[in-house]
């Protein structure tokens, strides 16, 4: 595997995304081919990583896909690059609750044998930083913290005190970022504003962060840290599926309202024989000609509800397509788009439910079971997915729920909808964790491939 490092922190809010994105951009601009990764299920940070590197941002989440394919997925995403930067999640040892750190940044760092670059928010810190670093380094000695970046440093004197603290515990300081509001990315109710929505402002923000990292971080020292671990041979990632003959055309919603998708999803759809076309529900007024299946990923449709509602031709086309029985896979934002209304504005009306913003954040991994057959899963199939939303439906599930799982106090939960060919749910799943579900979906699309006038099929 390529030279690599993991950007971690003691806790959320320390500046991991700022530093990781800035490092990616600065390394690229200095001549490196940079592979970007994010630990965990997050969709938003990888969008900024893509801006910084010009490559797809990818996720490494052992909870969603299993730890055995993390290294192969890493190798797959890093192919053709000379350095990989992996942004961690939350604090270094924070993973799935009640699992002793499964899915944590530390867990992933060990799976890919990568050193850790530790980002510390220095506000309110002085010599006690030495104790913090000593504790994190000693908690699990198999995780190697190889250097520190001091963030939010207030003055030259403050910097010197912090450097002395790092020297006490034998850790090198690889960079010092001063307090500056320009070194942040815009935030919203679920985290950052997505790069696709932020547009030119996102590009400007990444530029500013890259300039700051170039000025205040020792990039040569960062490269040296990334190259300080031995090369590691891993098997190539292969979804292990054969293509469907005469593969169908599958439309995947994209654009600013639907940005929550994993890069491997489209890759597995194509490996299963499908042709993939992107449709933007904010602009396009029809599904691509010959569409035999539709994927509606997550995103922030609640931020674009008026524009989505105003696109009556596409809403009508999606409703007619879904009611034809053709396969539709909708997750979270896609689920809301299929509802009757979203915050009072008409949507596609495929599901007999209304969506609305709420003050409550629903967040966490779920071990779910499919109660009945659908275009994605046979009855009894088990998956681990992730919920992350502040919206709710007036009716949480239909007569045939998409999933069942054990909730708080082991109370049974039913969620989502299976209606005809529609599988719609709040639950995000990672296709690399179950490529056969993607192939099953492609196979379910095949009967809806329409012949052209000369008798061939759309491909």
Image: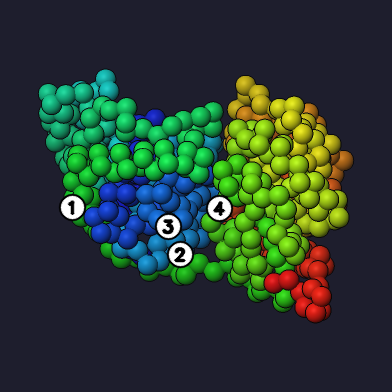
Locate residue 93, reporting x and y percent.
41, 39
Callout 4: helix, strand or loop?
loop
Picture residue at 58% right of the left edge, 47% below the top: 255
How far apart are labels 1 and 3 at the CA level?
Answer: 22 Å
Picture residue at 31% right of the left edge, 63% below the top: 82
Say which residue label 4 marks: 262
The reply to whether discs 2 and 1 touch (Cβ–Cβ < 8 Å) is no
Q: Earlier in the sequence, mark 2 or mark 1?
A: 2
Q: Please give the label number shown on residue 55.
A: 3
Picture residue at 32% right of the left edge, 33% below the top: 183
Locate residue 152, reporting x and y percent.
27, 28
Callout 2: helix, strand or loop?
helix
Q: Is residue 280 visible?
A: yes
Say which residue label 1 marks: 220
Q: Earlier in the sequence, mark 4 or mark 3?
A: 3
- What is the quadrant of residue 364 in the picture? top right
Please determine whether, in this image, residue 36 is positioned above or below residue 187: below
Q: Earlier in the sequence, mark 2 or mark 4?
A: 2
Q: Please give the label number shown on residue 76.
A: 2
Q: Earlier in the sequence, mark 1 or mark 3?
A: 3
How far apart are labels 3 and 2 at the CA level?
Answer: 12 Å
The reply to whether discs 1 and 3 touch (Cβ–Cβ < 8 Å) is no
Count neighbours of disc 1 (C-alpha within 10 A) and say few if under 14, some if 14 to 19, many if 20 or more: few
The reply to whether discs 2 and 4 touch (Cβ–Cβ < 8 Å) is no
Count neighbours of disc 4 (C-alpha within 10 A) and say few if under 14, some if 14 to 19, many if 20 or more: many
């Amino acid at each position: 595997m390529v030279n690599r490092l993991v950007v971690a922190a003691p806790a959320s809010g320390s500046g991991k995304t700022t530093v990781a994105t800035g490092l990616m951009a600065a390394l690229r601009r200095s001549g490196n081919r940079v592979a970007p990764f994010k630990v965990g299920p997050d969709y938003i940070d990888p969008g900024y990583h893509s801006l910084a590197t010009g490559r797809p941002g990818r996720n490494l989440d052992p909870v969603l896909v299993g730890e055995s394919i993390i290294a192969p997925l890493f190798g797959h995403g890093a192919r053709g690059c000379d350095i990989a930067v992996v942004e961690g999640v939350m604090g270094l040892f924070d993973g799935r609750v009640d699992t002793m750190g499964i899915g944590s940044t530390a867990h992933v760092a060990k799976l890919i044998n990568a050193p850790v670059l530790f980002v510390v928010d220095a506000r309110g810190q002085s010599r006690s930083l030495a104790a913090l670093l000593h504790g994190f380094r000693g908690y699990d000695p198999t995780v190697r913290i190889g250097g520190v970046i001091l963030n939010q440093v207030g003055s030259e004197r403050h910097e010197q005190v912090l450097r002395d603290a790092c020297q006490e515990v034998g850790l090198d300081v690889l960079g010092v970022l001063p307090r500056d509001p320009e070194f942040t990315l815009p935030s919203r109710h679920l985290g950052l504003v997505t790069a696709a929505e932020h547009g030119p402002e996102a590009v400007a923000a990444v530029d500013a962060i890259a300039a700051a990292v170039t000025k205040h971080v020792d990039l040569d020292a960062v490269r040296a840290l990334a190259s300080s671990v031995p090369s590691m041979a891993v098997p190539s990632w292969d979804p292990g599926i054969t293509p469907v003959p005469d593969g169908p055309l599958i439309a995947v919603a994209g654009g600013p309202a639907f940005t929550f998708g994993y890069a491997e999803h489209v890759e597995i759809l194509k490996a299963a024989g499908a042709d993939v076309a992107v449709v933007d529900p904010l602009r396009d007024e029809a599904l691509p000609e010959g569409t035999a299946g539709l994927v509606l990923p997550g995103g922030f449709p609640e931020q674009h509800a008026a524009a989505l509602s105003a696109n009556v031709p596409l809403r009508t086309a999606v409703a007619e397509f879904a009611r034809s029985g053709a396969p539709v896979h909708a997750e979270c934002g896609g689920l809301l788009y299929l509802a009757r209304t979203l915050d009072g504005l008409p949507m596609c009306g495929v599901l007999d439910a209304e969506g609305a913003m709420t003050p409550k954040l629903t967040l966490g991994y779920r071990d779910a079971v499919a109660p009945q057959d659908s275009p994605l899963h046979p009855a009894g199939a088990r998956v681990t997915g992730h919920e992350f939303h502040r919206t709710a439906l007036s009716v949480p599930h239909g007569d045939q729920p998409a999933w069942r799982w054990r909730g708080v106090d082991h109370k049974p939960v039913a969620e989502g909808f299976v209606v005809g060919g529609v599988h719609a749910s709040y639950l995000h799943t990672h296709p690399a964790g179950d490529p056969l579900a993607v192939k099953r979906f492609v196979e379910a699309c095949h009967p809806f491939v329409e012949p052209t006038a000369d008798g061939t099929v759309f491909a």
